[in-house]
Amino acid sequence: MNEKTFIVPNISCGHCTAAIEEEVSEMAGVTAVAAAIDTRQVTVTWQEPATWDTINALLHEINYPPQQLIQL
């Protein structure tokens, strides 16, 4: 399993977090997605066939690009 937590500055409401969680969780291999309005943090957990590159590309496509990875 792979996991990344990152900041998405475009998060401003519950619709934003719901859109991120819904879109990313539909990707094959993604096992968990959690987005928070107050911190603008998103955590994604995945395994193959998903990759960070495909997740990152989808986030850009839906206009929620990650800006800062957080090392936990």
Image (cartoon, rainbow, N blue to C red):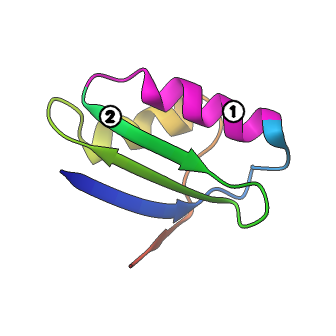
Spot occupied by residue 71 in the image (x, y as percentages of width and height): 39, 78
Spot occupied by residue 41 in the image (x, y as percentages of width and height): 61, 61
Query: At x 45% / y 63%, what residue is drawn?
Result: 5
Q: Is 16 within the magenta?
A: yes
Specify the amino acid type for callout 1.
Ala
Residue indicated by mark 2: 30
Specify the amino acid type for callout 2.
Val
Spot occupied by residue 3 in the image (x, y as percentages of width and height): 31, 57
Label annotation for residue 39: none
Report the number of numbered marks: 2
Snapshot quadrant of residue 48: top left
In which quadrant is the C terminus drawn? bottom left
Residue indicated by mark 1: 18
Judged left or right of residue 32, residue 3 is left
Query: At x 30% / y 43%, what residue is drawn?
Result: 53
Dot 2 or dot 1, earlier in sequence: 1
The magenta-colored residue range is 15-28
Q: Main secondary structure of the magenta part?
A: helix
Q: Nearer the viewer, residue 57 or 37?
A: 37
Mark 2: few, some, or many residues within 10 Å (few <14, many ≥20)?
A: many
Q: Is residue 20 above or below residue 5?
A: above
